[in-house]
Image (spheres, rainbow, N blue to C red):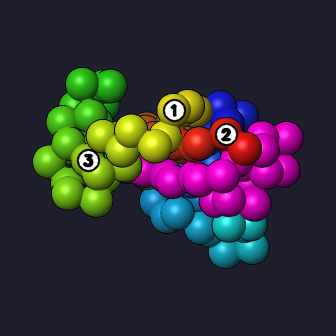
Amino acid sequence: MEAAAQKHSELQAAQNTMSHQLPGEASMGDRVTAEGYRWRGVAENVAAGYTSPASVMDGWMNSPGHKANILNCAYTEIGVGLAKSSSGTQYWTQNFATPA
């Protein structure tokens, strides 16, 4: 899961675009599966422009949908990615999963 999150952050940074699925990119579930992770449930949070772990977590916790992913006890594993674009924008990805 960590590899899927990191690769997604790197692709967002390369394209300087925040999205759960960039043009030509596989869906989040397919990205996680492609890294060899077997899952029953999976979710994702993405963010851009935050400059520290504390600030991005504050942003996610103040967003109902993102907060729901973070607090969902069904997800027992997490992968985190962070990449910086050439302009300096930081792109963050959290993948949450329930293993199969």
Disc 1 target residue: 76
Q: Is mark 2 in CB contact (under 8 Å) with mark 1?
A: yes
Q: Residue at x 29, y 51 (%)?
A: 68
Q: CA distance from mark 3 to mark 1?
A: 15 Å
Instruction: Name the quarter where the C terminus is drawn.
Output: top right
- Label 3 secondary element: helix
Image quarter for residue 50?
top left
Residue type, mark 1 in image: Thr
Q: Give the magenta range.
A: 28-45
Disc 2 target residue: 99
Instruction: Name the quarter where the N terminus is drawn.
Output: top right
Q: Is mark 3 in CB contact (under 8 Å) with mark 1?
A: no
Q: Is residue 30 above or below residue 67?
A: below
Q: Is 42 within the magenta?
A: yes
Question: Who is closer to the viewer here, 55 or 96?
Answer: 96
Which numbered disc flags the more N-terminal residue, 3 or 1?
Answer: 3
Question: Mark 1 packing: few (<14 Cα in 10 Å), some, or many (20+)?
Answer: few
Q: Residue at x 64, y 59 (%)?
A: 28
Residue 67: mark: 3
